[in-house]
Amino acid sequence: MDLKDIIKPENRVYAKTPVLTENVMHYCPGCSHGTVHKIIAEVIEEMGIQEKTIGISPVGCSVFAYNYVDIDWQQAAHGRAPAVATATKRLFPDKYVFTYQGDGDLASIGTAEIMHACNRGENIVVIFINNAIYGMTGGQMAPTTLIGMKTSTSPYGRSEELHGNPLKITELIAQLDGTCFVTRQSVQTAAAARKTKRAIRKAFENSGQSKGTSFVEVVSACNSGWKLSPVKANEWMVENMFPQYPLGDIKDR
Amino acid sequence: MALRGAIVVDSEKCKGCSVCLVNCPTNTIALAKEVNSKGYNFAYMAYPENCTGCTNCATVCPDTCITVYRVKV
């Protein structure tokens, strides 16, 4: 069978979702942000909620998420996306509101906002990208940086005595009564990406049913910040990040 | 019944990150020797006869530059 017999519109099984714009992403090659953007766009397309979804973009590499996912967006000050999402959801209760935040944004400067938004049980979705580093500003140490991990502000590796321990913010959030669904996923393989898609779909459905805050952490690789190739960064993530941040549902009610 | 597949890579959008290569169960994909206008060695279907159209490569592609086709033969 010839290739031109296979490559026909009726045989197409996977194509870019129209919810993603045509813009070329500014992310580094192999960055997990692109995969998670795509998953969110596919979930929005499958649920048919493109006109009813409002995203809150953070500060960090993904500040430009509004260039790539073709929905309504609002950009928030550093760490304040859950506060902006709270206001947006209360003003437009029939919309699907989600925040998209990194670990520097959510687990550091925005800890108070995320804790209280989750504790109030705002009917929003929180997508949390945890790559254990400040990617945009040059690879500084984040609260989620692993012990012994070298960053530009911990050049000899993070030490417990000097810098404290990695923050398992997702486990903390699972303790709060306002959250209905707290899970940790990854996107380095096709199987993992499909599981993440199911989790994000469930989170959006919970938001539609007003069940409380849904929190999806995606353990991600920052290959530029980690000074590794994209493939090596994914391998490093599996070896080192997953023991500290084990995958799976932490809370589901 | 066998499955035959094919992928089409948007070579201008591809950044050559190789995540699709390691996720391909049939070693269909390789990086091209030539580069696109941004200087990246883009992914292409090096062994078309291997492809089953499983969509793994397209699912993990961060830049969504792969389209997958599949037929039953």
Image (spheres, coloured by chain):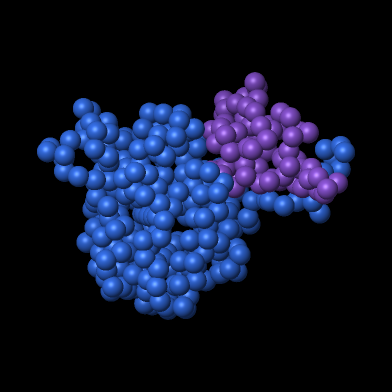
Residue furthest to the front: B1
Residue furthest to the left: A161
Left of B29 or right of it: where is A49?
left
Q: Please tell me which residue is depicted at 31% across the width and 40% down the height of the picture.
A: A133
Number of numbered callouts drawn? 0
Quadrant (top left, top right, bottom left, bottom right) of the C terminus of chain A: bottom left
**Residue closest to the eye, A212 or A101:** A212
Vertical placement of residue A137 versus A76, above or below: above
Quadrant (top left, top right, bottom left, bottom right) of the N terminus of chain A: top right
**Residue closest to the eye, A54 or B63:** B63
Does residue B13 appear in this view? Answer: no
Q: Which chain is assigned purple?
A: B
Q: Please tell me which residue is depicted at 58% across the width and 52% down the height of the picture.
A: A21
Vertical placement of residue B53 versus A75, above or below: above
Q: Which chain is assigned blue?
A: A
Q: In which quadrant of the rendered view does residue A142 lie?
A: top left
Residue A105 lies, in percent from the top left, at 30, 52
Vertical placement of residue A70 versus B32, above or below: below
Residue furthest to the top: B33
Left of A13 or right of it: where is A57?
left
Left of A230 or right of it: where is A22?
right
Residue A192 lies, in percent from the top left, at 51, 49
Left of B19 or right of it: where is A103?
left
**Residue closest to the eye, A13 or A191:** A191
Residue A25 lies, in percent from the top left, at 52, 43
Vertical placement of residue A79 versus A134, above or below: below
Q: Please tell me which residue is depicted at 36% across the width and 34% down the height of the picture.
A: A225
**Residue closest to the eye, B43 or A173:** A173
Q: Please tell me which residue is depicted at 31% across the width and 35% down the height of the picture.
A: A139
Residue A42 lies, in percent from the top left, at 58, 58
